[in-house]
Amino acid sequence: MKWIDGGVCAPRGFAAAGVRAGIKQQGLDVALVVADRPCTAAGVFTQNAFISPAARYSREVVRCGKPVVATFGNSGCANACTGPEGEQDLQAIVNTVKQALARHRPGLVGEVLAAQTGIIGVRLFPERMAQPIDEAVAKAGPEGWQDAARAIMTTDTRPKACAVEAQIEGRAVHIGGMAKGSGMIAPNMATMHVYLTTDIAAQAAILQPLLGDVVGRSFNTISVDGDGSTSDCVLMLANGAAGAALSEANRSALAEALNAVCERLARELVADGEGATRVIEVRVTGARTDADAALGARAIAESLLVKTAVFGGDPNWGRIAAALGRSGAEVDPYRTTIRVGDVLLFESGAPTAFDRASAEAAVRCDEVVIAVDLGLGEGASRMLSCDLSYDYVRINAEYHT
Amino acid sequence: MKWIDGGVCAPRGFAAAGVRAGIKQQGLDVALVVADRPCTAAGVFTQNAFISPAARYSREVVRCGKPVVATFGNSGCANACTGPEGEQDLQAIVNTVKQALARHRPGLVGEVLAAQTGIIGVRLFPERMAQPIDEAVAKAGPEGWQDAARAIMTTDTRPKACAVEAQIEGRAVHIGGMAKGSGMIAPNMATMHVYLTTDIAAQAAILQPLLGDVVGRSFNTISVDGDGSTSDCVLMLANGAAGAALSEANRSALAEALNAVCERLARELVADGEGATRVIEVRVTGARTDADAALGARAIAESLLVKTAVFGGDPNWGRIAAALGRSGAEVDPYRTTIRVGDVLLFESGAPTAFDRASAEAAVRCDEVVIAVDLGLGEGASRMLSCDLSYDYVRINAEYHT
């Protein structure tokens, strides 16, 4: 497996475009990914009760197993909480994309997935979208992956795209991806949109659970602020152009490649978290169960006191202990160890005589590792987060509806 | 029932003092409350697995139902996560208080409750405490309630104390209280210490469940940052000096008075939350169950995006909807209404055509009320919180271990 250029266009047969529709005040805001043939689609969607029309619609298309030929995405407007009109608007936009495909790519027939992100409660009028959608479909090409990655950004400060090549069944198989998301990031799909493409052939019955597994290990273990949004999704298209097919036998090879792409995009999401200056990786081991480990990891990763301590460069193990102790996980203080980086800060129920300079160095780096061992069993979990800075408050207090 | 002066010294027979032991860099840091006779004690304690020696010890004294004559409190050092030495240090401090009581108040025999707050993982050496404890016991008097309220402060910006007088069984009964807490505030006892006194006579079997109920409705419905600490407790002493006794018949009258004191102290805690500029009261009604309502209220009250929007003075109902939608409560968007103050922002699955100026005015006041009705049943809950400002980040990032 090796890293390659090309993002969502790295797999054979995928084209992309990013254009400006004027939804955001500036910059590209409509992203299109078009396949060369009908694809198997898989997806993971927000669990928010206020699920947006686009996420609900795409979830339904994936659930029905219909072949998909393109994904439409826009930033600047989530079209969520917009009532029955919002559902109709989304449907009109999807139809507009299908009509543009019929004009510019005759013979390419299938469903269109949609993802919309941005402000909640504001409608996106379909008539404003006809021209930019036509432009995007006409323009989509193998070079469009960078524009597309830019067009899905909201408060992100940089586009996020990557791709890998793996050898499966003697063929070069590719997986490409792009992601957006910066605030409202929490497990179970937050304000985060991820588009994945691959040129392996795949049945939905194998691809969907595979995607679910990988998302569980990557995007569902990140948190910027513990908030989850109404419109988040991971969409994946598989067109089969590589000449290899996904099977139970080669599932683990594809999973490894897919995991590499998702893990990298997940890490880029937290690194670009609103106001983030440091990535925090929390590893909990030795828990009675994996579920206990996950409780502990999440409580630490989302603790405002831990996040502000990391921002301040302070190896404040007491706040880590306090968050762990209230997490609901089974914890015995006298069996618990707490490390930051390689530095053991706490064991046997009390702080160690750790070297202050080493501990500060471990917390003043770009990727801070907080490792907790509970000494009770084999349960383990991991969570990616980021620190909490003045800029998080500035970005979210100055943002106005 | 009427509000009166005197804090914990308002009930007959209670004396208090606040002195300086030099634990904090400046100011009073040891608080003593002394009764004129052995009291019934009740208490509610942190559920954190890293429970501090003082909280664990006081919990045990209350559980055993032993008569209590005094409470000892200090700020600047929580003596938590300090291993077996920390347990021994706490025991030595309690013994020092008992010896000082024997010297200055001969004949007053009983247990001493303790509460310690401040930095975690640092020991408080008992030998440093002998002189200030002696001074506090010698000095304790009816005027000491203000000094005592100051001596328990950590990052609090002002002392918090109040008292009420109620008529029960034809007698004037008093309840007094003082509280500290500013950060690490969440339901289930956070970095929050509350001391309550009353001159009603009470059996522990009635007083303890009554205190539990009232704490559940007041202190356990506040949140500053969702973090819960290792050392938090509500302690209550009842000395019987008023000549009236608590019974099942007059329980509701005392509950009303106790609730008034706790509610006011709870509101003062969030108003003085670290960096807080506004109190947020979240009311959820119409839920399928009370538990569902509590899930929704807590998700909204602790949402960083809601808290930063309130700091920014923005009536961002979309963030309220997103937090509610991910809360786990049963929610039907088309039956949900969202109000800020009196202004209806959301109904029938979409935002209303609300008046912008009125909505902004409702969110730009000292106490912001967010009212959500789920339209599904009779379940209701309430949560007090505060906004998230630059100062929260400053206080917690600049604080160093």
Image (cartoon, coloured by chain):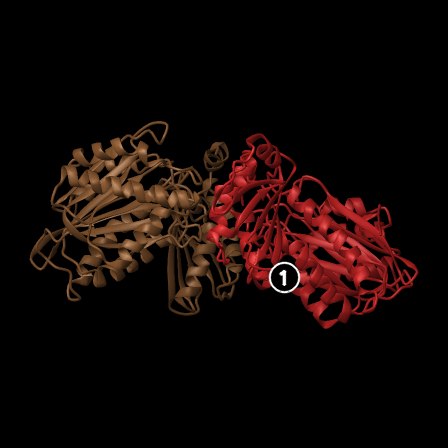
Chain colours: A red, B brown
> From the viewer's perspective, is B7 left or right of B168?
right
Task: Return the residue nearer the eye: B321 or A302.
Answer: A302
Task: Return the residue nearer the eye: A248 or B29.
Answer: B29
Residue B272 visible: yes
> From the viewer's perspective, is A44 left or right of A207?
left
Q: Could you tell me residue B258's position as x and y percent?
A: 22, 54
* Type of the residue with mark 1: Pro
Q: Could you tell me residue A110's position as x and y percent?
A: 80, 66
Give the answer, above or below, for where B220 lies relative to B285.
Answer: above
Q: Residue at x 68, y 62 (%)?
A: A44
To which quarter of the image does residue A258 belong? bottom right
- In the rendered structure, the residue with mark 1 lies on which chain? A
Task: Return the residue nearer the eye: A182 or B210.
Answer: B210
Q: Could you tell me residue A390's position as x and y percent?
A: 53, 35
Q: Residue at x 72, y 49 (%)?
A: A265
Q: How many marks?
A: 1
Give the answer, above or below, for where A242 lies relative to B137.
Answer: below
Q: Which residue is mark 1?
A: A53
Q: Residue at x 32, y 48 (%)?
A: B266
To which quarter of the image does residue B268 belong? top left
> From the viewer's perspective, is B41 left or right of A397?
left
Residue B116 visible: no
Q: Could you tell me residue A124's position as x and y percent?
A: 64, 53
Provide the secondary structure element on which disc 1 rests.
Answer: helix
Identify the residue at the far top of this view: B26
Neighbour class for label 1 at 10 Å: few (<14), some, many (≥20)? Answer: many
Give the answer, above or below, for where A169 lies relative to B115.
Answer: below
